[in-house]
Image (spheres, rainbow, N blue to C red):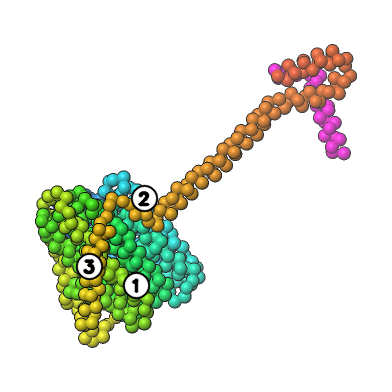
Amino acid sequence: MSASLAPALPMLACGLILPLVAERARNAVMLAVAVLAFGFVHTLAPGTELHLNFLGLQLTPLEVDKLSKVFGYVFTISAFAAFLFAYKLRDLRQHVAALFYIGSALGAVFAGDLVSLYVFWEIMAVSSTVLILARGTSASYGAGLRYVLVHLFGGLLLLAGIAVHYYQTGSIDFAPFQAQTLASWLILVGVLINASAFPFSSWLSDAYPESTITGGVILSAYTTKTAVYVLLSVFAGWEVLIYVGCFMVIYGIIYALLENDMRRILAYSITNQVGFMVTGAGIGTALAINGAAAHAFTHIIYKGLLWMSAGAVLYMTSRSKCTELGGLWKYMPWTMVLGTIGALAISGVPGTSGFTSKTLILQAAVNQHMAWPWLALEIASAGVFLHAGIKFPYFVFFNVDRGLRPPEAPRYMVLAMGLLAFFCIYLGVHPDPLYAILPYDLEPGYTVYKAGKVVGQMQLLLFSALVFFLFLPLLKRTDTIALEVDWFYRKGGRLAYALADKTFNGINAVCARATSAVTGWLARTCTNLPQRIVQAAATPYYALLAPREAESARNQLHKAVQTGFVGVGPTLIAIFLGLALLLALAL
């Protein structure tokens, strides 16, 4: 049974017991757990399932297929590299949060029902927020708050969709949605929020750059790719995803080119790259799903490498803006070389992993005669080379020497970057091991290394390089802020807050004044009420007296009521009149 709960179980269990482990042994334990989780992924056979009964529902917290194993493999490889990169980190909060985050991501991709998926989905949202807040700056607190609010909103949509789906079908199976219903649309939107799809994409570029150095490396791998896994599993072939994906690839490039902060460049680049995968999910053919899964695999590797490279620079210089960096290649040569390998891989240079995965998606679009999606992806490929392939290494490691003289990154950081750089090159020149684990078999002898593809890709990249250096004066960034779509809901949020404040607090004030007036009147009325009733009852008696005697009698009765001493005679008269009134009403 323990093997059937893997690979999420080792990560989650380690997160629980890590506070009990000696501080100096924690990093080694985490590395061992990553290796153990990888081993569990490898031993799980497609078709393995685990069922549990909970509140009358049959849950399937483990269901293995070839697609989930692709994500399981790369999630555990990425975890090992990230733990190695953070080998000297002594922050227990980040360690525990990372273990729960990665463990829940593994749980999500191996979940066989919607309820289990939702539970792991929410654990991911909460634990990943800690990796942002742990940086301890005012910017990280603000970004973390916005991050968790956006993800809780996405989680609510997902939960609402699951509830409606269960009400309509009586099923919680994690299976492809054949019909476009309210439930499936709610779930789709909730998933696209995690995939950083427009117009909810700005949470990524807002939060990830404000995370800790290790947090940025880890965050870059799991949330968006878990969403991609869900799209490939249950929304493959939905045409709307082609439009969403193509918009994402262009949108990510534009903002990455405008950015000045190196980690924000990489954040926008995630949106751009996830757009390729979303497009592949929308195409929905076997080759497209293979391409999207392969691209998710390679993207996690080279994007982790780029975030490590940027993190090493930030760790050694305490600077993140391109306008404050430059000339570091002399002092951080290993970081520069390994980071450049990641930049070449994300650009899809032949011989790197990005080329062997991205080409599958492009070929799938060609096979389906989808001209404009193919054109959008080709334009995006050129744009990726501009912002990540050239701009990132040029402005960070070359460009103008800013006088920074940092030493090379620590050995464990370089070793982690070297491991991922190895995968970038190995899967670029020998992609067969990656192709062998994809969900669908490729044609025998299939290869992306055909003369036409290689020459065409090189022409595209060289043209992009030419454009970069021709327009270099325009691409030099200044210390400015690029307006994003989140401006609307940030301003809208403040406007809504102010409107709600004025409206509801205004209503409260009016109600308070009205209540005060009514209670005051009642208080005054009740205070004199016995006096008025008695005087009114005695009015016939006063009419029988002379004016002076009537006034004297009225004053005596007033004092008697105030002091509580009323004579027997008036009391009997009042009782008599009261009884007469009751008798009259009764008759």
User: Which amino acid type is shown beneath numbered disc 1?
Assistant: Ala
- In the image, what residue occupies the spot 82% across and 34% down? 582
User: Which amino acid type is shown beneath numbered disc 3?
Assistant: Ala
Quarter assignment of residue 127: bottom left
Front residue (pair 218, 198): 198
* Dot 1: element: helix
* 430 on left or right of 560: left
**Mark 3 packing: few (<14 Cα in 10 Å), some, or many (20+)?**
some
Position in image of residue 75 (x %, y %): 25, 66
Name the quarter where the C terminus is drawn: top right
Q: Which residue is mark 1?
A: 376
* Magenta-drawn segment: 563-587
Position in image of residue 264 (x %, y %): 28, 56
Q: Is residue 578 magenta?
A: yes
User: Which amino acid type is shown beneath numbered disc 2?
Assistant: Leu
Q: CA distance from mark 3 to mark 1?
A: 19 Å
* 507 on left or right of 429: right
Front residue (pair 221, 317): 317
Quarter assignment of residue 352: bottom left
- In the image, what residue occupies the spot 27% across and 70% down? 382
Q: Is residue 517 above or below residue 262?
A: above
